[in-house]
């Protein structure tokens, strides 16, 4: 076998170390460094990876990169070539079951590790899904349509508009529910945009992702998929929702309203939280526990209203102390039509920015205020400074989340150049993006495990 086949992708000092200790890619190896001992399967590397590290998949499922210059000894314990392929099985059709469409956009949920290159590649056909999560066939007849295969930081207006249009088409055809597989990083941007672009949906539109890819033992992919497909097929809530792990255990999933949800942790599986409100429902394999009753209910008509438009010259300015006015001036000079400020506290920026706010207003730029505290309201009447900013044209958006405000402003400015009309759109709550009050239990509780909170409190009391 050639070096290329034996040491797939390795080069530099990492390749030298593998050769020195006689360790092949795919072998079970024990590697000693000056700090620790590691055991696991030696993974191949992608062509773009550095030549300094050997990567092994540990028994825990985690991949660890070991610097080759720290290796003090190593040995091969065994060798078994892995062929990582999801078994494809034809998704069974049951005439008694309803039709659910799963749109793929990419992200971890649609990925598996391609051990040949070390890259994460999509796995998405209905056959592949059924092969890995056969329970899906107990719920519905699932059809898939891979619209994109991107990590979610690459989602943008074009993808938003395509997705909204396709959802509209499927609803008109009579689908029972829609699932959108999506990377978690910007899932809350897309759930917001769909909440505005797809109105009056008669069926659930459920966004789902996973924090850990399906090749890892702790993956949340299968359970999130089961919960989301069940929601699309059987839930009574005809809204845009995010369906992800509720508590840190796998007891249940939570259904979050698309405009009030946010990714709040970079790696926890229970990363999505409803902010300043209570989630819509809990879901498990058996069914739903509805946590509120003010949701839009499933209907049998097909009267959906698609408004797939987006103005791209919109941005968020995240205020920090000592921000210079030229930050805002630059946006105005570059032709931005709308700026959402994420201000401090109740919605503040420093005094030196005020002249820039005035210049923005004179240039006809729509400027809105949200709060970087995320919970709570922009209340610009409380301090003199807030009033002054409103005098300069800044419009507070109550408790609309900054990312939701950015999305809504892009959507609103694509519909009108008249700033009064835009203001009407912005301040009229369409899908819960502004709520009139924050429920007492909206702050941190009902967020996926009161028992966890209790446990935590009892631990620190000890
Ligand atoms: N970076 C990925 C994404 O957002 C993470 C994920 O899928 O969870 O696309």
Image (tube, helix red, strand yellow):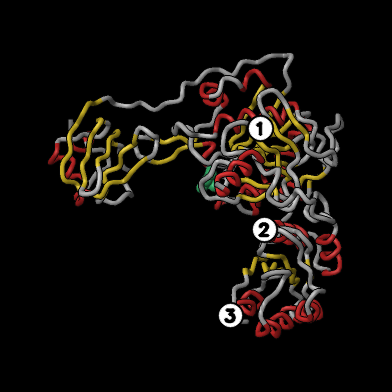
Label 1 packing within 10 angstroms: few (<14), some (14-19), many (20+): many
Q: Is residue 362 left or right of residue 107?
A: right
Residue on which the image places disc 3: 322
Q: Is residue 67 left or right of residue 353?
A: left
Inter-mark Cα distance, 1 to 2:
23 Å
Image location (x, y in percent) of residue 176: 76, 28
Q: Is mark 1 within 8 Å of ligand 1?
A: no
Q: Is residue 150 something that shows in the picture?
A: no
Does label 1 or label 2 sit earlier along the sequence? Answer: 1
Inter-mark Cα distance, 3 to 2:
23 Å
Single out the mark in the foreground, 1 or 3: 3
Q: Nearer the viewer, residue 161 or 299?
A: 299
Image location (x, y in percent) of residue 424: 86, 63
Q: Nearer the viewer, residue 295 or 157?
A: 295
Q: Is residue 66 left or right of residue 405?
A: left
Q: Which residue is painted at 63% across and 74% down in the image? A: 331
Residue on which the image places disc 2: 403
- Which label is found at residue 36? none
Q: Which residue is painted at 72% across and 18% down in the image? A: 97
């Amino acid at each position: 076998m050639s070096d290329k086949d034996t040491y797939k992708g390795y080069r530099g000092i990492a390749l030298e170390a593998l050769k020195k200790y006689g360790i092949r890619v795919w072998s079970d190896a024990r590697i000693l460094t000056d700090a620790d001992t590691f055991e696991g399967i030696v993974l191949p590397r992608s062509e773009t990876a550095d030549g300094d590290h050997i990567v092994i998949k540990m028994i825990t499922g985690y991949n660890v990169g070991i610097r080759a210059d720290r290796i003090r000894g190593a040995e091969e314990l065994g060798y078994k070539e892995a062929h990582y392929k999801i078994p494809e099985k034809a998704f069974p059709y049951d005439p008694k079951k309803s039709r659910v469409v799963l749109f793929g956009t990419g992200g971890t949920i649609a990925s598996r590790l391609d051990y040949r290159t070390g890259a994460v590649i999509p796995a998405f056909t209905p056959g592949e899904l059924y092969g890995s999560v056969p329970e899906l066939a107990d719920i519905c007849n699932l059809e898939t349509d891979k619209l994109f295969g991107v990590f979610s930081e690459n989602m943008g207006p074009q993808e938003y508009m395509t997705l909204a249009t396709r959802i509209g088409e499927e609803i008109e055809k009579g689908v029972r529910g829609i699932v959108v597989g999506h990377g978690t990083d910007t899932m809350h941007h897309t759930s917001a945009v769909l909440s505005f672009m797809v109105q009056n949906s008669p069926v659930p539109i459920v966004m789902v992702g996973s924090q850990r890819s399906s090749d890892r033992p702790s993956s949340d992919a299968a359970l999130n998929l089961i919960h989301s497909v069940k929601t699309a097929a059987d839930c009574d809530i005809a809204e845009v929702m995010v369906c992800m792990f509720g508590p840190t255990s796998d007891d249940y999933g939570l259904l979050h309203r698309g405009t009030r949800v946010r990714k709040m942790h970079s790696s926890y599986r229970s990363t999505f939280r409803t902010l300043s409100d209570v989630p819509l429902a809990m879901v498990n394999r058996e069914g739903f526990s509805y946590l509120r009753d003010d949701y839009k209910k499933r209907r049998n008509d097909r009267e959906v209203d698609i408004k797939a438009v987006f103005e791209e010259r919109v941005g968020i300015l995240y205020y920090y102390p000592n921000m210079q006015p030229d930050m805002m001036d630059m946006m105005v000079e570059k032709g931005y039509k709308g700026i959402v400020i994420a201000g401090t506290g109740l919605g503040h920026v420093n005094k030196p920015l005020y002249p820039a706010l005035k210049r923005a207003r004179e240039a006809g730029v729509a400027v809105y205020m949200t709060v970087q505290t995320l919970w709570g309201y922009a209340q610009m009447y409380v301090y003199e400074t807030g009033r002054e900013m409103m005098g300069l044209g800044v419009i507070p958006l109550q408790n609309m989340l900054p990312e939701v405000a950015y999305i809504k402003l892009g959507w609103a400015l694509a519909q009108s150049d008249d700033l009064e009309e835009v203001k009407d759109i912005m301040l009229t709550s369409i899908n819960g993006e502004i709520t009139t009050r924050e429920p007492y239990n909206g702050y941190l509780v009902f967020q996926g495990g009161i028992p966890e909170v209790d446990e935590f409190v009892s631990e620190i009391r000890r």
